[in-house]
Image (cartoon, grey):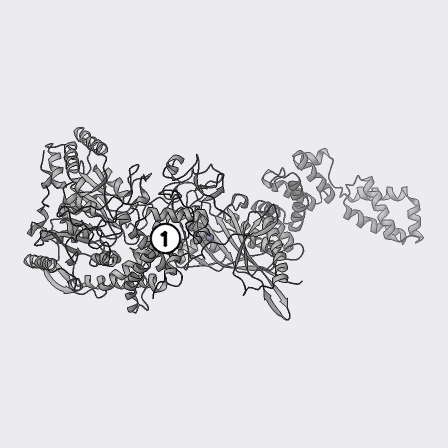
């Protein structure tokens, strides 16, 4: 059996094509690793070994019968628990959705099935994708494979840790303010947040609809390109999915970019940036210069308003998106919704049922954002907060438009620091929010953002380099990142796992 | 009159689409609970709405037909409120940029001389319908989501309506128009047309005008209910004002529900929290841009509207507003029937009279539609033309029509069998006249010595002639020849 | 601006979140902290700036009016916390 700690989707595909290993053997290999590592890391929240093996066997049969095979035939892909898989638990890391089984597949799941991928488990996440540490999960925190005392990032921490720990070669996450790129950075892997509208959101349980995007995690860019190709493209079920052709990312990856003008985002090097992280990014700049790139400082003047704008827009949308969880049609319903106070006496039983169900079903961070968003949209405050945030969002988009007049790709750190300790920021919501300051603005602007491994700290923690490109320029973004990847070996590093 | 009633209507109509507004499941009425849903209309986590093109085009067609101004840019907003018939707990609706503003509805003229004039529309917007709640047993209500997500058009009038009859007329005109456009079947009983009314009174008092607090009346499930509820509410508000003297400045808008069995409006329990819908742009739906070409395309797809048809019947056919309305208000079938007969005869008033006095009366008695009516327009036109060409006189025509309706036989069959046909032959009529004179020497005598006035005698003699010709003689010709003969005699 | 404990209690009802008195104290503190943070937005002059509400600025996306399958009733009701043979059940709604 092949060494899965060296495996990539591409390497597994060639092994299967040359019949050196079967999809079933690969699936078994990962399931064995999961049995060994998952109790410690808490990566998978639902993993049905039999279902996994069944899918693998189907692919093997297909291959034996010489039938046409999809681009990911037999490759295990771990799925963030925010994506609907028909008839299988889809719980968003929330008590609210315990036992919820969607009656349909998310479009990305359908596309993975069409590509003959093997869905391997649902991964842990911050509840309803709200968080940067995967500590806000009803299933308890996921641990960083590089240091179990540290967070794997969030909200897609489970999917990032799954790839980092070689519990799957590929995984899917979702990114609303950095939830793919930040975990990718602190887990030492590749994570891509595509252009808004590039990948269908149908079946992605919404956090903030105008910001959410689904994207891939992988060890290297070739694998990311492969998975991107499989999931991208217009979907009639998502009115915001855009009808622009999907480039053959995986075949054009090694084509050198036509132009290599790189902008270093000045505002991403202010206070709060860890010196070791800064050093790794500066080293990356040297790598690019050595590769013949022209690198210049670029300003995104409204960057510092990114977080404030985000923490109005995202909660506002979330307060509405999560209203449906009230214990009527699906989700948790409180057993006891009797009035507990004189004020509650005045409320009809139906209202008390909804209030009790939501209070029992949601965790603190989700409640905090629902409260914040409800306030930001409420009569008398909507203009001052919500509408103002939308205007600032426009200014932030304009910043990027201006920058991309001068450069092809923007780079900077993905996160201010490497992985922080479990519990370090749980008591201070605002501090937690600030771990997304470099990633938030691309969601507000709708442009693609990519994080690739670019170093290790003195204590051996991964550092991520963020690359940003204009809308629908993923192909050039990947090619530009590939220039760095070819010149370095950070993407081959693995965590020191027992 | 001690007060004026002031009414504004808020009407919801379901649009006639095959599938729901944002997803593919059906839109039928009267199915067993929860068999007409899909993940989107259930508001399942992860689902997204996609706008039904037909729904938007039917909405556009309606707004254009109502003379509304179409917005070049329109978007959808979320109206957030918690209710069990609303699976997402927000309704996808339109807030600050509805696809249309303004427009008007005409109120048809009534026999009593009331009606006429127009009501201005505030706005028309497109939104999704909710599910249905039924109050079951054991402290539970049942939620049926078959209806959730059916495209709904909200049409709001200005508070310009000044009488209950006008309110009813305005609502009927809306139904007539929407049906003729084919955008909705407007069945109040099935809830495909629903109406709420905002009502208050203007009371002249000590030289100034006092306005009573506005009341919104809900669950008006029939035209009769609209009439009764408004009537009741006007009197209730007047009595209330005489007691408490409260005006629009002293009280918030109140919501009351109409109870049909009791024939009263009852206060509906106020929400525990003041409504704060927290509208914001629906991020899952993209805005719609409507250019002039699209509007023109829609306009060209609209046929003659009831108002236009009424106007044509009045101006081109010279019918009275009342007659024109009778022929239009009962729907396209009647108006088309009349149009066919009118076209084939050129006898507009005659066609209108015969249709109203015979065709519609019988159809009503037999409770059948004109589609089922035994006499088709071409047959009625043929009959009217025979009367016109004096082959039959009017009374005969009526008789023949009666028999056609009874037997369904052809005109010719009935005419020959019944020996109908009008005698217009001068010789024959002169003979009959001479015979009548010969048979009544007393009459001739009275005439010649001027004992009786000629017209008195003429009437008598005409009767004799008609009788002797079995009622077939052309009455006009009989009159003419009698006049001549009587003139000779009376010298 | 400062959110009072009562303001927070009102928002909680609007958001259908039941709050223990202790929650109210915690949230009042945290919300004020966060609202204070986002209040930076007011520093910016945004007159004549068009709000950006959507992730992508496309227009006129429709589906054709084609009827598809309905879910079997059992599938529709499968996740209901409380149901009978044909409907979802909720605590009685008083009119
Ligand atoms: Mg609801
Ligand atoms: Zn409405």
Q: Quadrant of the C terminus of chain B?
A: bottom right
Q: Quadrant of the N terminus of chain B?
A: bottom right
How busy is the neighbourhood of tag 1: few (under 14 within 10 Å), some, or many (20 plus)?
some
Name the secondary structure under disc 1.
Answer: loop
Q: Residue at x 93, y 49 (%)?
A: B445
Residue C69 shows up from this direction: no
Q: Residue A355 in the image: state x and y as whole percent.
A: 39, 49
Q: Compared to B137, does A391 lie above or below?
A: below
Q: Quadrant of residue A237?
A: top left
Callout count: 1
Which subunit holds the residue at mark 1?
C
Q: Compared to C1, does B149 lie above or below?
A: above
Q: Quadrant of residue A457?
A: bottom left
Q: Which residue in the rendered view is the most extreme toward the bottom? A: B207
Residue C51 shows up from this direction: yes
In terms of depth relative to the viewer, which is nearer, C80 or A203? C80
In terms of depth relative to the viewer, which is nearer, B47 or B487? B47
Q: Residue B465 in the image: state x and y as whole percent.
A: 83, 43
Q: Quadrant of residue C53?
A: bottom left
In terms of depth relative to the viewer, which is nearer, C28 or A293? C28
Q: Residue B257 in the image: state x and y as whole percent.
A: 55, 51
Question: Does mark 1's beta carbon lie closer than 8 Å to ligand 1?
Answer: no
Q: Residue B441 in the image: state x and y as whole percent.
A: 92, 45
Q: Which residue is mark 1?
A: C19
Q: Which residue in the rendered view is the most extreme toward the left? A: A290
């Amino acid at each position: 059996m092949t060494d899965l700690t060296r495996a990539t989707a591409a390497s597994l595909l060639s092994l299967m094509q040359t019949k050196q290993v079967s999809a079933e053997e690969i699936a078994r290999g990962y399931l064995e690793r999961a049995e060994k590592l998952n109790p410690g890391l808490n990566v998978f929240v639902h993993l049905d070994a039999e279902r996994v093996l069944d899918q693998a066997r189907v692919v093997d049969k297909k291959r034996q019968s010489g039938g046409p095979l999809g681009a990911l035939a037999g490759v295990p892909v771990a799925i963030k628990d925010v994506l609907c898989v028909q008839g299988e638990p889809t719980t968003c890391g929330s008590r609210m959705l315990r036992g919820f089984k969607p009656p349909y597949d998310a479009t990305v799941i359908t596309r993975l099935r069409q590509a003959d991928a093997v869905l391997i488990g649902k991964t842990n996440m911050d509840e309803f994708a709200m968080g940067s540490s995967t500590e806000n999960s009803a299933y308890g925190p996921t641990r960083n494979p590089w240091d179990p005392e540290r967070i794997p990032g969030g909200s897609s921490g489970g999917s990032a840790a799954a790839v980092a720990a070689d519990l799957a070669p590929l995984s899917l996450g979702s990114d609303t303010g950095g939830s793919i790129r930040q975990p990718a950075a602190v887990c030492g892997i590749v994570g891509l947040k595509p252009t808004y509208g590039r990948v269908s959101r149908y079946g992605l349980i919404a956090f903030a609809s105008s910001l959410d995007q689904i994207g891939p995690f992988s060890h290297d860019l070739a694998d990311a390109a492969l998975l991107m190709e499989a999931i991208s493209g217009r979907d009639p079920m998502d009115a915001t999915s855009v009808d622009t052709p999907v480039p053959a990312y995986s075949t054009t990856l090694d084509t050198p970019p036509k132009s290599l003008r790189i902008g270093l985002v000045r505002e991403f090097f202010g206070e709060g940036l860890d010196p070791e992280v800064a050093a790794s990014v500066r080293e990356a700049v040297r790598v690019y210069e050595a590769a013949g790139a022209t690198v210049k400082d670029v300003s995104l003047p409204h960057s510092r308003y990114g977080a404030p704008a985000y923490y109005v827009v995202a909660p506002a949308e979330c307060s509405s998106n999560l209203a449906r969880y009230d214990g009527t049609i699906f989700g948790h319903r409180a057993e006891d919704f009797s009035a507990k106070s004189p004020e509650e006496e005045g409320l009809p039983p139906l209202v008390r049922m909804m209030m009790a169900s939501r209070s029992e079903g949601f965790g603190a961070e989700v409640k905090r954002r629902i409260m914040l968003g409800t306030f930001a949209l409420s009569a008398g405050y909507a203009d001052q907060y919500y509408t103002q945030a939308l205007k600032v969002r426009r200014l932030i988009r304009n910043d990027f438009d201006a920058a991309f007049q001068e450069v092809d790709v923007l780079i900077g750190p993905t996160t201010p620091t490497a992985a922080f300790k479990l519990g370090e920021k749980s008591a201070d919501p605002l501090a937690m929010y600030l771990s997304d300051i470099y990633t938030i603005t691309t969601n507000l602007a709708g442009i693609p953002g990519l994080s690739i491994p670019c170093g290790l700290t003195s204590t051996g923690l991964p550092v991520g380099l963020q690359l940003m490109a204009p809308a629908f320029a993923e192909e050039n973004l990947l090619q530009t990142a590939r220039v760095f990847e070819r010149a370095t070996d950070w993407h081959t590093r693995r965590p020191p796992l027992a | 009159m001690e007060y004026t009633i002031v009414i504004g209507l808020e009407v919801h109509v379901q649009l006639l689409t095959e599938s729901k507004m944002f997803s593919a499941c059906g839109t039928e009425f009267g199915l067993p609970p929860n068999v007409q849903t899909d993940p989107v209309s259930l508001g399942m986590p992860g689902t997204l709405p996609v706008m039904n093109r037909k729904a938007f085009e039917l909405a556009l067609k309606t707004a254009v037909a109502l003379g509304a101004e179409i917005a070049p840019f329109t978007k959808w907003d979320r109206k957030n409120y918690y209710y069990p018939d609303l699976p997402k707990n927000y309704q996808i609706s339109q807030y600050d940029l509805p696809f249309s503003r303004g427009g008007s509805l005409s109120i048809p003229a009534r026999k009593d001389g009331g009606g006429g004039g127009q009501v201005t529309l505030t706005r028309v917007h497109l939104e999704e319908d909710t599910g249905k709640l039924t109050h079951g047993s054991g402290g539970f209500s049942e939620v049926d989501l078959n209806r959730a997500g059916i495209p709904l058009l909200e049409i709001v009038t200005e508070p310009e309506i000044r009488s209950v009859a006008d309110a009813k007329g305005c609502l009927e005109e809306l139904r007539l128009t929407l049906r003729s456009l084919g955008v909705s079947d407007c069945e109040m009983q099935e809830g495909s047309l629903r109406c709420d009314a905002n009502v208050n009174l203007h009371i002249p008092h000590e030289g100034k005008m006092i306005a009573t607090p506005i009341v919104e009346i809900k669950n008006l499930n029939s035209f009769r209910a609209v009439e009764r509820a408004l009537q009741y509410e006007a009197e209730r508000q007047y009595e209330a004002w005489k007691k408490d003297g409260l005006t629009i400045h002293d009280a918030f808008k109140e919501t009351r529900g109409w109870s049909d069995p009791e024939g009263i409006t009852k206060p509906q329990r106020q929400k525990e929290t003041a409504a704060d819908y927290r509208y914001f742009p629906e991020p899952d739906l993209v805005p719609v841009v409507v250019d002039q070409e699209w509007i023109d395309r829609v306009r060209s797809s609209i046929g003659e509207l009831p108002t236009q048809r009424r106007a044509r019947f009045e101006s081109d056919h010279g019918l009275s507003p009342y007659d024109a309305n009778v022929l239009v208000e009962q729907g396209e079938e009647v108006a088309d029937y009349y149009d066919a007969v009118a076209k084939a005869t050129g006898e507009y008033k005659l066609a209108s009279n015969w249709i109203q006095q015979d065709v519609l009366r019988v159809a009503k008695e037999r409770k059948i539609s004109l589609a089922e009516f035994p006499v088709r327009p071409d047959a009625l036109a043929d009959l009217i033309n025979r009367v016109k060409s004096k082959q039959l006189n009017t009374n005969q025509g009526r008789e023949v029509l009666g028999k056609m309706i009874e037997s369904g036989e052809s005109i010719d069959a009935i005419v020959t069998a019944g020996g109908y046909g009008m005698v217009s032959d001068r010789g024959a009529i002169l003979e009959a006249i001479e015979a009548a004179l010969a048979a009544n020497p007393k009459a001739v005598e009275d005439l010649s010595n001027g004992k009786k006035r000629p017209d008195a005698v003429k009437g008598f003699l005409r009767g004799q002639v008609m009788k002797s010709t079995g009622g077939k003689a052309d009455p006009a010709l009989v009159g003419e020849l009698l006049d001549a003969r009587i003139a000779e005699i009376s010298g | 601006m400062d959110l009072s404990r009562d303001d927070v209690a009102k928002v909680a009802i609007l958001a259908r979140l039941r709050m223990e008195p202790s929650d109210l104290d915690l949230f009042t503190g945290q919300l004020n902290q966060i609202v204070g943070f986002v209040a930076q937005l007011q520093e910016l002059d945004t007159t004549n700036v068009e709000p950006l509400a959507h992730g992508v600025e496309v227009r006129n996306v429709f589906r054709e009016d084609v009827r598809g399958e309905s879910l079997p009733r059992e599938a529709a009701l499968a996740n209901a916390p409380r149901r009978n043979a044909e409907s979802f059940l909720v605590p009685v709604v008083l009119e």
